[in-house]
Amino acid sequence: MSDIQHQNLAIIGHVDHGKSTLVGRLLFETGSVPEHVIEQHREEAEEKGKGGFEFAYVMDNLAEERERGVTIDIAHQEFDTSEYNFTIVDCPGHRDFVKNMITGASQADNAVLVVAADDGVAPQTREHVFLARTLGINELIIGINKMDIVDYSEDSYDEVKSEVNKLLKQVQFNANDATYIPISAFEGDNVAESSDNTDWYDGENLLEALNSLPEPSPPTDAPLRLPIQDVYTISGIGTVPVGRVETGTVSPGDDVSFQPSDVGGEVKTVEMHHEEVDQAGPGDNVGFNVRGIGKDDIRRGDVCGPADEAPSVAETFTAQVVVMQHPSVITAGYTPVFHAHTAQVACTIESIDQKLDPASGEVAEQDPDFIQSGDAAVVTVRPQKPLSIEPSSSIPELGSFAVRDMGQTIAAGKVLEVNER
Ligand SMILES: Nc1nc2c(ncn2[C@@H]2O[C@H](COP(=O)(O)OP(=O)(O)OP(=O)(O)O)[C@@H](O)[C@H]2O)c(=O)[nH]1
Ligand SMILES: [Mg+2]
């Protein structure tokens, strides 16, 4: 933890709209990625028949990502500006990988939404904006990208801008605070330097807009909550769970508990960026090692917390949900998959308790028979396998979730009360 403020920034938007290219370009222009690396990527991309993906390859490291020219899993990259130390979380836009985007968005304070000028608002633009809103993203910067393809036309920009603005209003994002910037990630217009190609635009470039983001609200004084993203075995060290500290701190010597696996022990070492540290706090991505914990004792979706304030495991929980899309209606008994922090667990909506007026949040109907697209409701949920989750009022970082079924996001919401197992 250093003195300069830290921000986790998600890059979201529809497939192929240029998210990875934008991150690569930004890192290149600010000197975080040297020219010869971009050159290497250019050669590799051309060999694979993926010319134009040289900047995207900065973030797309998996072989399959490079072959296909799509981002599959989230990738993190550190990046410093004069104001902030950013961890950029580049999310996949492809509809098959929205589950990974949810993990990325749930780790972020603010986000850059990338919308291609030649395509406008597309299905995953909508889905990502809805998820960003319900998973607690505060501010959006909207990069209207690929301006080079539309000849830097102000009319095209205005058209896409008003489409996005309408979308933000629909999901009740604070549309007036959003910053819109015409960019070309590929050519570098208005990314780190303001461009002459858009002389009709006199607002901030992306780097300036990033620096003007408000400081993230200080983390709650909640106890340690560290959702596990992966578990590795590293020779010489042993089992190393990795994840992002959402709240609290973790240090060697701490007595911790993993839930719902219900195992625990003493923390031996904590590593950040391959270096041992004395303490890690909110926003830090860590790998750590706990005495007596083997690879098969814990898994992705577990949450690590202090042994004396262990993460809650829900028998049932009540939640406020907003239905984004569903082909028919949702009734009691429906069992989709809930995505919360790094966990994915099938959960039954046991009862629909109240239908709410989405605008005011007031109760519109008690015990409705069903809810459908556009509705907000309070529901009681029973996880089909143990799930660690927290009331949003006490630990907001662990209190939100997305609901998926049939390859799409059905709903999202926040936890009101947990009835512990
Ligand atoms: N002309 C032009 N092409 C761009 C621009 N930005 C990205 N592209 C191209 O768009 C394609 C997709 O770029 P990516 O950066 O992989 O898009 P993405 O949004 O990260 O895609 P996913 O991660 O798979 O959702 C590549 O061929 C890029 O070269 C731009 O500003 N102008
Ligand atoms: Mg990408």
Image (cartoon, grey):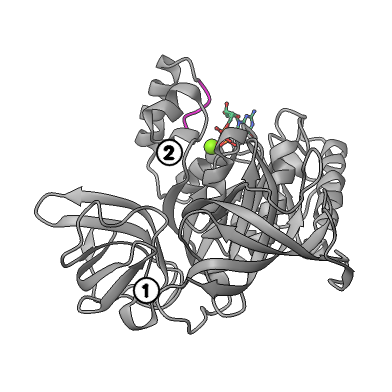
Q: Which mark is residue 100?
A: none
In the rendered structure, does residue 52 fall within the stretch colored magenta? yes
Q: Nearer the viewer, residue 158 or 319?
A: 319
Q: Position of residue 251 (x, y in %)?
A: 26, 76
Whether residue 344 sits left or right of residue 323 in the image: it is: left
The residue that appears at 42% across and 71% down in the rendered structure is 225
Three-letter amino acid code of the residue under disc 2: Val
Is the residue at mark 1 in contact range of ligand 2, meaning its CB lies under 8 Å from it? Answer: no
User: Closer to the N terminus: mark 1 or mark 2?
Assistant: 2
Q: Position of residue 212 (x, y in %)?
A: 63, 67
The quadrant holding residue 260 is: bottom left
Ligand 2's quadrant is top right
Q: Which residue is mark 2?
A: 58
| Mark 1 Cα shell of 10 Å, populated few (<14), some (14-19), many (≥20) | many
The residue that appears at 64% across and 51% down in the rendered structure is 403
Whether residue 101 sits left or right of residue 282 in the image: it is: right
> In terms of secondary structure, where does tag 1 sit?
strand
The residue that appears at 74% across and 44% down in the rendered structure is 126
Three-letter amino acid code of the residue under disc 1: Gly
What is the span of residues highlighted in magenta in the rendered image? Answer: 51-55
Whether residue 160 sits left or right of residue 318 in the image: it is: right
Q: Position of residue 395 (x, y in %)?
A: 54, 76
- For the residues labelled 1 and 2, the Cα–Cα distance comes to 34 Å
The residue that appears at 22% across and 72% down in the rendered structure is 265
Q: Nearer the viewer, residue 400 or 219?
A: 400
Q: Which residue is mark 1?
A: 305
**Among all residues in the image, which is located at the extreme right?**
364
Is the residue at mark 2 in contact range of ligand 1, meaning its CB lies under 8 Å from it? Answer: no
Whether residue 80 sits left or right of residue 396 in the image: it is: left
| Mark 2 Cα shell of 10 Å, populated few (<14), some (14-19), many (≥20) | many
Q: Nearer the viewer, residue 74 or 7?
A: 74
